[in-house]
Image: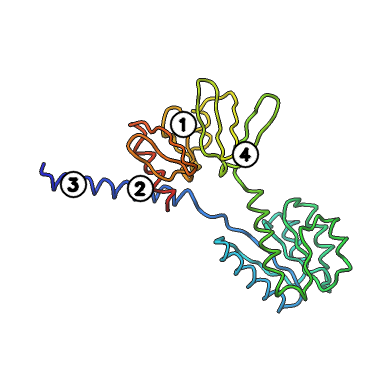
């Protein structure tokens, strides 16, 4: 085989590898579709809220579907029929037929997690919102300048509640860490060390078990003793990688290809 043919084969292999990695992770990282309900008997308010919600989602790089209701009863009916799956409900209180507070109480009877934000003209019902655990309360005269801030708080709260975490037992204490905070796991015989930018945790366990638990997340087994958060890698060399904090981690020869693929994806 000539040098030219060898280089062509290497290029084709590299292109194929990157394509496979891209397809693999694209399938794995589908965005969660947020379902939002807007309920107000004034059409122009409904239209404003729908547009504002979609603008906020676009700025946050999130996908969502907005369903509008002009009365609380159809919304309640969906819940009572078991057909509702909303993440956020923007709900007027003073509607002519089924008012928002009545609707919220019925919704809470079947869904304890949906985030309810009251959008209304009057502040007189603000304390009643505690009965249905309303997340926020925004007055209609403040919508133009205040809505985006309130809705961002909703998105932040949803992100926080959906955040992936690693939970482990340390002596008699249960510890739960956001995956995004973990730099790497290190195995030292039967001891697992978890290293974050600010702290180190140790507990008894097997790195094989942790690798299996996190196989669909952004962690790569670069060495028999190390499981690394690929998003924290800044460079990969022949036998080691470097993390954002400057720490270097060994990379074994047989795990080099997988490690480099994970790094390439994390850079995207």
**Mark 4 or 1 closer to N-term?**
4
Answer few, some or many: residues within 10 Å of disc 1's Cα (few below 14, many 20 plus, some between 14 and 19): many
- Residue under label 2, please give it: 20
**Mark 3 or 4 closer to N-term?**
3
- Residue under label 1, please give it: 226
Closest to the observer, 241 or 261: 241
Q: CA separation, marks 3 and 4?
A: 45 Å
- Residue under label 4, please give it: 177
Q: Which mark is residue 7?
A: 3
Kindly check if marks 2 and 4 are in contact, taking CB atoms under 8 A apart as contact.
Answer: no
**Mark 3 or 2 closer to N-term?**
3
Q: Which is more foreground, mark 2 or mark 4?
A: 4
On the rendered structure, is 231 left or right of 89? left
SS class, disc 4: strand
SS class, disc 2: helix
Quarter of the image for residue 263 reads: top left
On the rendered structure, is 63 left or right of 146? left
Residue that appears at 60% across and 31% down: 201
Q: Colour mode?
A: rainbow
Q: CA separation, marks 3 and 2?
A: 20 Å
Q: CA separation, marks 3 and 1?
A: 33 Å
Q: Which mark is residue 52?
A: none
SS class, disc 1: strand
């Amino acid at each position: 085989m000539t040098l030219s043919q060898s280089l062509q084969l290497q290029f084709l292999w590299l292109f194929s590898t990157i394509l496979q990695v891209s397809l693999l992770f694209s399938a794995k990282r589908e965005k969660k579709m947020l379902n939002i309900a807007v309920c107000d008997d004034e059409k122009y308010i409904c239209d404003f809220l729908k547009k504002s919600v979609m603008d906020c989602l676009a700025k946050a790089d999130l996908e969502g579907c907005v369903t509008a209701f002009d009365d609380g009863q159809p919304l309640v009916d969906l819940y009572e029929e078991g057909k509702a799956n909303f993440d956020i409900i923007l709900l007027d209180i003073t509607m002519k037929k089924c008012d928002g507070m009545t609707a919220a109480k019925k919704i809470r009877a079947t869904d304890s997690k949906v985030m309810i934000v009251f959008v209304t003209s009057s502040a007189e019902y603000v304390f009643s919102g505690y009965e249905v655990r309303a997340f926020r309360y925004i007055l209609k005269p403040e919508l133009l300048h205040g809505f985006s801030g309130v809705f961002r708080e909703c998105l932040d709260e949803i992100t926080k509640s959906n955040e992936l975490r690693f939970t482990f037992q340390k002596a008699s204490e249960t510890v739960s860490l956001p995956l995004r905070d973990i730099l790497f796991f290190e195995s030292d015989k039967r001891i697992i060390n978890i290293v974050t930018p600010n702290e180190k945790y140790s507990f008894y366990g097997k790195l094989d078990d942790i690798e299996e638990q996190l196989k669909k997340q952004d962690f790569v087994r670069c060495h028999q003793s190390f499981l690394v958060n690929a998003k924290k890698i800044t460079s990969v060399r022949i036998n080691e990688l470097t993390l954002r904090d400057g720490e270097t981690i060994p990379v074994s020869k047989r795990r080099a290809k997988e490690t480099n693929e994970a790094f390439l994806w994390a850079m995207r």
